[in-house]
Image: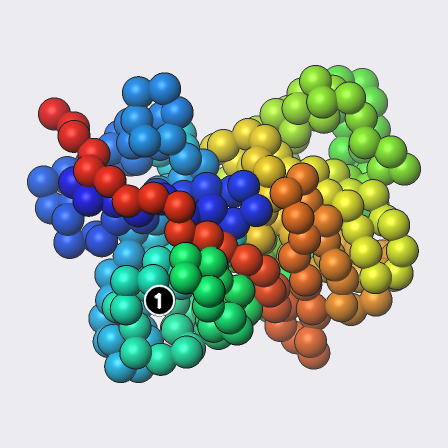
Amino acid sequence: MKFFKIHSLGNDFLIIDEAGLNRFPEISPFAGRICDRHTGAGADGLLLISVKDKAKGRVKFRIFNADGTEAEISGNGLRCAASYLYHQNKIGSRHINFLTTAGSRECKLIEKRKNFFQIRIEMGIPHLTSKEIPFDDGSAHDKIIDYPLSINRKIYPITALSLGNPHCTIFVDRFPARIEWHQIGREIESHPFFPNRTNIEFVRVLSRDEIDVLFWERGVGETLSSGSGSCAAAAASILKDLTNRKVMVRTSMGHLTVEWEKKKVYQSGPAEVILKGDFFSS
């Protein structure tokens, strides 16, 4: 099976044309096998792409985490998918309309240099109510800001929202030791108050225009960056009035720019096509 591998700031994905999966009726187990870093090609996730209209740039998009679970959306995944489409000349427009399970998302090509791309993605309108996230502690909330979440007898003030997928942000003055924030991320990901599990961001605010973020992704674990996570971290910072509405998000491998314009959130950042290959699977 032909595949491409693309990363955005170290958050890596395998991309396959959905038509090539006809002989795999169960996609989730296949996604787990091909994403395995020891016995597969290795990646944080699998992207399935299907071009519906080349001229108008309409493309169906699905994403599966490394554990085989299907996610709703991924900011880095969308940029990687766009880079693949432009790299392979599968789209005849500088704009792409991705059709995801979280709704349509617009994409714009900013720059192309061989196998390196700069892409701007619309991430939609942040959902803030407990029902929309979803977050269920038995009560209805208009917003989840500095909610006292108890983990192992310790209280963590969290800010939660959805960008088509659920996010939980924790603000810190300094980052905990790696083993500690991994444990916190693992506990919150599967906390019963998040019925669909959640992604977690640990945020240090550096200024009104810049934040530093660590990412624990649902179904993956630690990732070097996250597009939707960067947007969620920036949106949470804006909701708490800690930053302006345009924020540079620093990740372990570089930075993204997030802008909350009127109702919608946008992110701009890089993606790089790094290899193509054949995956042999029984």
Crowd tier of the residue under label 1, counting other residues whose Cα lies within 10 Å: few below 14, some 14–19, many 20 or above: some
Q: Residue visible at 78% across and 69% down?
A: 245
Color theme of the render? rainbow
**Residue 75: image location, x then y, percent:** 52, 56
Relative side of 276 to 193, left or right: left
Residue 11 visible, this angle: yes
The residue labelled by disc 1 is 86
Nearer to the camera, 90 or 180? 90
Quarter the N terminus occupies: top left
**Residue 272: image location, x then y, percent:** 46, 52
Work out which residue is located at the far front of the displayed protein and give it: 114
Q: Residue visible at 34% across and 62% down?
A: 87
**Residue 125: image location, x then y, percent:** 60, 68
Q: Residue visible at 83% across and 66% down?
A: 244
Tag 1 secondary structure: helix
Residue type indicated by callout 1 = Tyr
Nearer to the camera, 256 or 152? 256
Nearer to the camera, 203 or 198? 203
Relative side of 105 to 32, left or right: right
Q: Is residue 152 above or below residue 225?
A: above
Relative side of 275 to 217, left or right: left
Q: Residue visible at 49% across and 55% down?
A: 271
**Residue 255: image location, x then y, percent:** 68, 53
Residue 168 visible, this angle: no
Quarter the C terminus occupies: top left
Count of marks overlaid on the render: 1
Which image quadrant for residue 95? bottom left
Q: Is residue 121 above or below residue 185?
A: below
Relative side of 64 to 248, left or right: left
Which image quadrant for residue 93? bottom left
